[in-house]
Amino acid sequence: MLASLSVGWILGRLKVLEKTLNTKSPSYLLFGSLSTIIGLILAAIISIPFYGFVAPLNIFLPLIIMLLFGYLGFRVGTTRSEEWRRLLSFRNRRTADTENEQVLERKVGDHFRKYKLLDTSVIIDGRVQAIAKTGFIEGTMLVPNFVLHELQLISDSADSMKRMRGRRGLDILNAMQKDKDIHIEMYEGDFEDMTEVDSKLLKLAKLLDGIVVTNDFNLNKVAQFQ
């Protein structure tokens, strides 16, 4: 009787845990798992001297250390998952600056066709891929890094609908980059003094004398006004 109650309680806790994890973003789960493993490895190393203690200390002390470091590792990984992701995705700044300068210089060419700057909404919509394949969009499409970052945030959202839309957008971008008939480039620069992605996009469009491609009605009106 007691055993069946214990099993039922454990299964109930596991179902609650499963529901909780399903609401978390992939980056939350990834960094939480990695940091927990690191915490457990450190705990195992620190616990080595305690195995020589008399019972029951040689059992309880390592167990307590394991639980403590595992929990601390999980908390470090999940509470700062965004900072860890930025650190891991950091690229060579000098190379990025050189590429950005080349992008900015291209607009002075006599035969240069204006960049078409894609925003998050038009990427998620997906129709831009089919339109680009027909050759209807002249010139090169440009996806700024801050737009890609916004897309990644959406794909990591706890909201299942947003997460699905974000992943769809990333899949579309990957497909467009692999398509030899579609000319698409990335812009690694950012405007750190600005927080709104739309404002950054409009500023970049001004610098490049480019055209913003968007499904956002308000952004389209602001772009026309400016």
Image: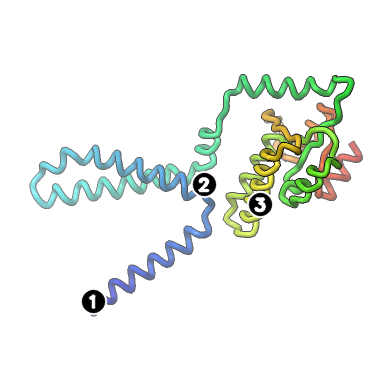
Q: Residues within 10 Å of mark 1 (few under 14, many from 20)?
A: few
Q: Is residue 220 or residue 168 the one in the foreground?
A: 168
Q: Is residue 70 visible?
A: yes
- Picture coordinates of residue 133 (x, y %)? 79, 43
Q: How many marks?
A: 3
**Quadrant location of the N terminus in the rendered image:** bottom left
Residue 163 lies, with reference to residue 142, above or below; the image says below
Residue underneath mark 2: 27
Residue underneath mark 1: 2
Residue underneath mark 3: 168
Residue 190 lies, with reference to residue 165, above or below; the image says above
- Judged left or right of residue 205, residue 158 is left
Q: Residue at x 72, y 32 (%)?
A: 185
- Judged left or right of residue 20, residue 48 is left
Q: Disc 3 or 1, which lies upstream in sequence?
A: 1
- Whether the residues at callouts 3 and 2 have beta carbons within 8 Å, the answer is no
Q: Residue at x 86, y 45 (%)?
A: 220
- Picture coordinates of residue 189 (x, y %)? 69, 28
